[in-house]
Image: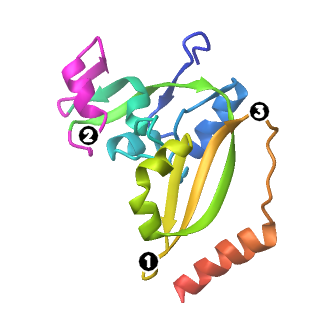
Amino acid sequence: VDTEKKQVTVEAGILLADLNPQLDKHGLALSNLGAVSDVTAAGVIGSGTHNTGIKHGILSTQVVALTLLMADGTLLECSESSNAHVFQAVRVHLGCLGVILTITLQCVPQFHLQETSFPSTLREVLDNLDSHLKKSEYFRFLWFPHSENVSVIYQDHTNKPPSSSANWFWDYAVGFYLLEFLLWI
């Protein structure tokens, strides 16, 4: 961890679910995260995983350096200043250029988000997409297939302390485990 530069170097196989608490201990965070955290740092980068917000790039844009194991067994250090042509390609490589061993990520100071969500229609969101993108730092919507229903979600930085309106029984017991069971059936 380089707290001065706000950068962290990690093994490529670390899960984001394990990385985020470690960053938290140092007062750092990734500026943009995908909705799923049970994925590896290298997998997120290699597949071009993204999240939300017009102001933030995909997760690969947070990579400032990496170590690549080439097919012939050589190690290649890549960054904007070292092997820059490979660096740009390997940030979304789809597994074609070698095996990523380490990744250095540019972080930001730790922050909290306040979420606002509300129902809408697919047509309304698509017709006003530019407006939605500008109303919030992080914007996403969840479409319910075979319907016009969407859930619009805005997230913005806040100084308020973290809180949750989550209810374990409804959100996890019913909302996750029961749904998983029904999908399995």
Image location (x, y in percent) of residue 154: 60, 50
As for residue 84 lying within the magenta part, the answer is yes
Toward the viewer: 179 or 11? 179
Q: Is 139 positioned to the left or the right of 164 in the image?
A: left
Colour setting:
rainbow
As for residue 127 lying within the magenta part, the answer is no
Which residue lies under the disc numbered 3? 159
Residue range (magenta): 71-96
Does residue 86 sit above or below 117 in this rendering?
Answer: above
Toward the viewer: 103 or 174? 174
**Residue sitting at 59 percent across and 19 percent down?**
1
Residue found farthest to the bottom = 185
Image location (x, y in percent) of residue 162: 79, 42
Question: Which image quarter: residue 185?
Answer: bottom right
Q: Is 72 positioned to the left or the right of 130 in the image?
A: left
Which residue lies under the disc numbered 2? 93
Alpha-carbon span between mark 2 and mark 3: 37 Å
Q: Is residue 52 visible?
A: no
- Amino acid on which the number 2 mark rests in the picture: His
Q: Is 151 positioned to the left or the right of 69 in the image?
A: right
**SS at badge 3:** loop
Q: Is 122 positioned to the left or the right of 20 in the image?
A: left
Which residue lies under the disc numbered 1? 145
